[in-house]
Structures are given as C-alpha cells and as structure tokens.
C-alpha cells in the first residue's frame, strides 16, 4: 500500500523558473484538498545553473498519518549541459539519498539507502537533460497551438530518462490564488516504463509554470502557484484509502480463494486501454475494453516468461548481496531441501520477523527492513524478494490487489497490495509474507525489481476500473 503514496513524490516534474535568481511556491492539492507544498528555485552563479525542488505532502492512511517529501537539485552549465544532481526522499522517517556527477557521457553515483553509502558508475543516457536543459529546449519551440516537441528528461530520484512529449495548446485565462492570468496550455505525456502518464501545465512566455495537473489514483493532483503563506498553510486531512479500495460484488470464502476465481473488470473512463499481465497464476482475456482475469491459487508451468539476468541480481532496493541479507537468508532456509521448501521457509521467516506491522513506513528497501523490521506489505515483499535472490532463486516484486473481508471500516473489498514471485520448479510462484500465503484473491497489476518508480501501471488502473463480476470456478481448475 505504501507505493500508492510514494509515486506522488516521484511523479512531480522539475519546474524550472526563468529568472537568474527565483523562488516559486505552489500549493499541492489532491481532489481539491490541500495536502502539501512545493518549492521551485533557480540560481545562476559562475556560469552554472542550480535548479531545486522541495516537495512535502501529508496523507491519512486509515487513521495513520504519513508524511512524505523529496528534495532534488540539478547543476548544469548555462547552456544546459548536465554536471550533477542530487535527490533526497523522506518517507515517514526513512531517508534515501542519491548523488551524481556527470562527465564524458558517464555518471558517478553515490547512493545511501541504509547506514552506509554505495558507489558505482553508470552510463549517462544519451540526449538526457536536466531542468535547465529542458527549459532551454522548450524555449526553442514557438508557443503556437499544435506545435509538438520531445525531450528526454532525466529523473534524479529514479535514475531514469523519461521521454516527454509536449503539445502546445491555446492561450487561456487561468484563475490563481493571486488573481487571473493569461497562460499557455501545454499537454504533456511522460512515458514511464511503457506506460503513458498525461499531465497539463499552464505556462507564461518564459515557460514558468503557474499550474499543473496530473492523474493520481482516479483524481487530479494539482500544483497551483501562490505565495509562501498560501503554500505553507495547514493541510487538510485526506484519507488515501477512499480512492483505492475496489468493492467486491460479493463475499469470497476460504474454499473459493483456495481454488480458482474469475474476475470481470471494466473501465470507468475513456483513458488508455486496460493492461494487466499474464503470470503463471493469472490468465487475462480482453474483449472490447473488458478484462476477464482468471487467477489460480496454484501456479502453472511457465515456459513463455523465464527469468532474466536482472531477476537474480542485487539493486538499490533488493540488496541481496549485503552481508546481513545473505546471513539472514542462509539461516532462515538452512534446513530446507528444495527451492520450493526454501521459499516457504523464507516466507514464514519474514512473516514473523517483521514484528511491527504498520502503515507508517513510506517505502523501505530490503536492507532497511532487515535492520528495522517494521512496515506493511511492501516491506514484506522487498525483504522476501531479496532473501530469495541471496540464495540463488530469481525473484520479482508484484503490485496489485488482494481480497479482504474487512479493511479500514469497509467489508468485502480489494485492497492495493504487494507480494513477490520466485522462479521455482519452472514457473513463477507467488509468496505473500504479509498475509502468510498466496491465494486466488490476488490480482496482479504489475511486477518489477522492487524499485517504487516502476509500478505506475498498477496505480493507473486503480482509479479507473470497476470489478463487475466475481465467479468461483472450483479447486480442480487450478491443478
């Protein structure tokens, strides 16, 4: 569930201002309710441009308050050539830091996800731009309706280069807290991991942004320019679960969940086509915008989707070669004889190891969970995935929905959830340490390497789908 709020921190783009020294404040609204503030700064000194952004937001998650924030900085030449960047993400007390220096087509990275820094080198994405470079590129395109331009925007928080397509629209009068202003409407499409994200911004002739809206779990996330007093005014209580629970047409019992369940999912808007992955446990059929998803409690043989090398390697969120992770994995699976037995042993271990099961953790890496065993489903999933990789079993982290007879005052609902899959006996088998086991009440929306940046596809479905029909097919179908 924590990934639902993390993506709001990651999606807010760099909003560079044109003036040599500038500071612009924004109020952040979700569905019209104020949830935080955003600050954009730009300073030119010694032929270098330093652009910064600070985002702070607050949510209520089923009675638990959670504060999230990010602080990003980019350093470039006055011509827009990347020189360096930094990113600090704070998620309810958990802090992650990334620092990068760019030179000669490469970047040297320092990453801090726990108690120590890790360093590595990587290739700088060819043609990728930071904030000033993006602003200068946009200034080359006349503000004429219908003009289209594309750039490759580097995101320091995720170390990804994202293709951004901007289409210039007409000039419009926009109501702002400080009055009405005539601005140009810009439609943008960010291509995240093959999934398009649409937003709309309103800018002046210097490309300074005064308003921006983007979709977020079925409602609009809005940044609107105002003075500091307005931006830092008290936030309004906003329960994110109000928008993310999917009602079930009927109750499901344990016998049905142990077998096979067929779900009919329909779109509630005219957005992008619904796209849910096939897995060893999940078959998907599409018919005129309607998805028929059949989920089996037992996995089938999966010859079409074998593991990739990255499924066995450590990364910044699944630190499977860290000494603490390796020792923990070996100890927890020591008496198991097969990969299946090892994964079940690890699943049981993680379930009991995370003793403080709460919603207050924003998003922690596997190493952070190993050192501080608390959190919700995502913390269970990343730790279990890292432990599997530590003993040589390929793993993936899965995001989707899970059936719950009672949750946060609601009955018979599907709740945003995370679990993991391991490549065992020629198939991807799901394991759920947060709930103790996997069943047919799980609907997978996306899978990946544990990086919270790569799960937007699942979130995109939450606000624009409805579960129309649920059918239990019986245990024999799952064999």
Image (tube, rainbow, N blue to C red):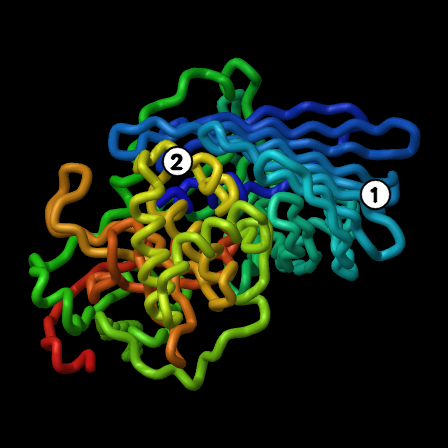
Mark 1–mark 2 CB contact (< 8 Å):
no
- The answer to whether residue 175 is visible is no
Residue 170 rendering spot, x and y as whole percentages: 58, 49
Could you classify mark 2 by the number of other residues whose Cα lies within 10 Å: few (under 14), some (14-19), or many (20 or more)? many
Which mark is on residue 269? none
Q: Is residue 308 above or below residue 406?
A: below
Closer to the camera in the image, 221 or 416: 416
In the rendering, at what x and y percent does residue 461 appear? 35, 58
Horizontally, is 1 left or right of 36 in the view? left
Give residue 128's position: percent from left, percent from top: 74, 55
The residue labelled by disc 1 is 83
Please give the label number shown on residue 30.
2
The answer to whether 51 is drawn above or below residue 157 in the figure is above
Taking the spot 31% from the left edge, 62% from the top edge, the residue there is 344
- Are there few (<14), some (14-19), or many (20+) residues within 10 Å of tag 1? some
Q: Residue furthest right?
A: 46
Q: Residue at x 41, y 16 (%)?
A: 234
Q: Is residue 117 left or right of residue 329?
A: right
Rendered image quadrant of residue 291: bottom left
Whether residue 440 is situated above or below residue 35 in the rendered picture: below
Which residue sits at x=70%, y=35%? 73
Q: Is residue 432 visible?
A: yes
Q: Is residue 286 left or right of residue 331?
A: left
- In three-dimensional space, the C-alpha distance between marks 1 and 2, rounded to whole angstroms, equals 34 Å
Name the side, left or right, on which 360 lies relative to 149. Answer: left
Element carrying mark 2:
strand
Quadrant containing the N terminus in the rendered view: top left
**In front of the other: label 1 or label 2?**
1
Q: Nearer the viewer, residue 418 or 179?
A: 418
Q: Residue 404 at what x, y percent from top left?
A: 17, 51
Quarter of the rendering occupied by the C terminus: bottom left
């Amino acid at each position: 569930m924590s990934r639902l709020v993390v993506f709001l921190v990651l999606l807010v783009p760099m909003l560079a201002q044109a003036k040599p020294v500038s500071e612009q404040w924004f109020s952040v609204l979700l569905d019209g309710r104020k949830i935080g503030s955003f600050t954009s700064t730009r300073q030119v000194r010694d032929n270098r441009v330093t652009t910064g952004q600070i985002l702070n937001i607050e949510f209520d998650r089923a009675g638990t308050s959670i504060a999230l924030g990010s602080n990003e900085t980019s350093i470039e030449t006055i011509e827009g050539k990347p020189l360096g960047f930094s990113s600090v993400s704070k998620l309810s007390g958990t802090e992650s830091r990334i620092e990068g220096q760019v030179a000669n087509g490469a970047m040297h990275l320092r990453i801090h996800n726990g108690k120590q820094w890790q360093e590595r080198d990587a290739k700088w994405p060819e043609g990728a731009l930071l904030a000033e470079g993006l602003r200068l590129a946009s200034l080359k395109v006349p503000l004429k309706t219908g003009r289209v331009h594309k750039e490759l925007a580097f995101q320091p928080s995720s170390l990804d280069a994202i293709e951004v397509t901007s289409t210039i629209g007409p000039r419009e009068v926009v109501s702002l807290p400080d009055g009405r202003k005539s601005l140009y409407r810009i439609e943008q499409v960010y291509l995240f991991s093959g999934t398009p994200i649409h937003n709309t911004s309103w800018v002046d002739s210097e490309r300074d942004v005064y308003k921006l809206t983007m979709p977020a779990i079925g409602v609009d996330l809005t940044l609107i320019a105002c003075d500091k007093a307005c931006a830092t005014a008290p936030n309004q209580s906003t329960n994110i679960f109000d928008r993310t629970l999917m009602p079930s047409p009927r109750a499901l019992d344990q016998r049905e969940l142990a077998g096979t369940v067929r779900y009919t999912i329909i779109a509630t808007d005219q957005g992008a086509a619904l796209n849910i992955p096939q897995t060893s446990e999940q078959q998907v059929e599409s018919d005129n915008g309607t998805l028929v998803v059949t989920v089996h409690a037992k996995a089938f043989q999966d010859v079409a989707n074998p593991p990739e090398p990255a499924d066995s390697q450590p990364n910044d969120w699944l630190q499977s070669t860290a000494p603490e992770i390796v020792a923990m994995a070996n100890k927890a699976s020591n008496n198991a004889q097969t990969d299946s037995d090892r994964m079940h042993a690890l699943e049981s271990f993680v379930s009991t190891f995370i003793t403080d099961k709460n919603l207050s953790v924003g998003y922690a890496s596997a190493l952070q969970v190993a050192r501080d065993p608390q959190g919700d489903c995502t913390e269970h999933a990343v730790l279990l995935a890292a432990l599997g990789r530590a003993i040589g079993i390929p793993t993936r982290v899965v995001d989707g929905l899970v059936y719950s007879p009672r949750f946060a005052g609601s009955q018979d609902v599907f709740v945003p959830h995370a679990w993991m899959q391991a490549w065992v006996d020629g198939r991807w088998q799901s394991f759920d340490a947060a709930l103790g086991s996997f069943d047919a009440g799980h609907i997978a929306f996306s899978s990946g390497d544990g990086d919270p940046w790569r799960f937007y596809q699942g979130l995109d479905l939450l606000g624009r789908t409805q579960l129309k029909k649920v059918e239990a097919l019986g245990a024999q179908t799952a064999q």
